[in-house]
Every structure is written in C-alpha cells, then in structure tokens.
Image (spheres, rainbow, N blue to C red):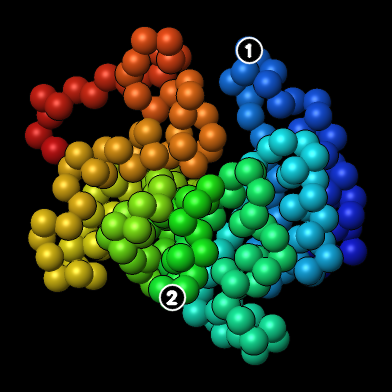
Amino acid sequence: MLGEDGGQQLQEGIDLIKKWTGKANGRITTMLDPHAPFTCTPEYLKKVVQLAEELQVPMHIHLAETQEEVAKMQSKYKKSPTKYLYDLGMFSGEHHVLLAHGIHLNDEDIDLIKYNKGVAHNPMSNLKLGCGIAPIKKYLNQGITVGIGTDRAGSASTLDLFKEMKIVGGLQKVNYFDPTVLDAKTLLRMATIEGAKLLSIDEYVGTLEIGKYADIILVDIMQPH
C-alpha cells in the first residue's frame, strides 16, 4: 500500500502464505491482498502480481467500490481502475483474482474481467456506505462468477448471509425494474458454489457431492419468519 510500512506488510503476507497455506488438513487457504488500485502504487501492484505467480496463490483486491475512486483513477491515470489493473498485468496469467465490490464498471471493464476473475458482491455494505448498486445481472449474463459477501460487520452491520441474499435479489429487481431477476436458485448458488469458486476452494466445498467436505448447515424453516 501507499503507507511507509507497505513493504513490511507485504513481507508479512508472504511469511503467512508460506507458513499457513494448506494447514489444518487443507482447510486454511491464503491470498495476496493489495487493498485497492487507488491505495497502491503501480510498482507495488506489479510486485504483488509477480509474487502471486511465484507463490501460486490467488489475489484479492477492492475494485470500483465508489464513484470517487473511479474519478480519482481517471484523473490520475486517464483510465478506469479496472483498466489500470489490467495494464499492470493483474488479470493475465493463470492466477485467480477475487474482486471485491465491482460496482462501477463500464462495458469495457466487464470484458476485462471475464476470465479467471470473479466479483464478491457485498450489498448491505454498499447500501450502508451509499456506494451504489452493482449490475449483477449483467455480470452473470457475461459469465462472470459472482459470490455474496458481507464486507465485514463494520461496513455492513451484519454478517448474516441469508439477509445478504435477500438484499441481493431485491436490489437487482429494483435496478432492472424486473421482479424475475435473480431467482432463489441463482441466489443460493451465489451464496454457495459461486462463493467457493471465488475463494478457489470449489474443489472441496460449495456443493453436496461425493468426495467433498461435509460442509453443510441445517435450516429449520418451521418458524414464523
């Protein structure tokens, strides 16, 4: 990041990856996590991309969460945050990239994130912080993997994934003026297998299949709510 301790933080991340990746019988996975395009220098991001290749781990970064971010990047680099990352090589190679938010993407941006990338959609956080509504229907139509997240309790005031699923569906119906957008099956997939794909752990969890971990919950639906 832009702070003076950016190099130290990166080294701490490298040490954590080398120490913990694959531990707890494979249940612990790691990613390199530069914060966002507007808080990281080009040189720093290039280094992270190089390390992702060397360490064979995915990357996670916040992208186009606010209109202010897009305007700032356009003013400084004459390009969108997505194009900025693309030109730095973040979307090349075999490594997977998890993009948090992805609210303000234009059609060119969407074309750039179609392969080996995915969007973590955090609707409650986006509402609380007044960031906007991500065009999730458009992303899904383009074959982009979209999972559902919370962006932590401080940003969303909740870690309730069921509440997030309900908000995802409601926002998209309003955004597209279409009550049929994102049916319950699609929302359930976004909260399970698509989320597992985003985290690069869909080989082990996300669906109930022979050979996968017994990662399930039981929901009692015999309640008034």
Between circles 2 and 1, the one closer to the viewer is 2
Name the residue: 20% across, 52% down.
182
Q: Quadrant of residue 54?
A: top right
Q: In terms of depth relative to the viewer, which is nearer, 159 or 99?
A: 99
Question: What residue is pinned by disc 1?
Answer: 25
- 2 is higher (above) or lower (below) than 221: below
Name the residue: 21% across, 58% down.
170
Name the residue: 16% across, 47% down.
183
Q: Quadrant of residue 207?
A: top left
x, y percent for residue 75: 65, 89
> The N terminus appears in which quarter of the rendering?
bottom right
Image side of residue 141 versus residue 88, left or right: left
Question: What residue is pinned by disc 2?
Answer: 106
For badge 2, the amino acid type reads Asn
What numbered label is drawn on residue 137? none
CA gap, disc 2 to disc 1? 41 Å
Asked whether residue 154 appears in the rendered view, the answer is: no
- 87 is higher (above) or lower (below) than 189: below
Answer with mark 2 or mark 1, whichever residue precedes in sequence: 1
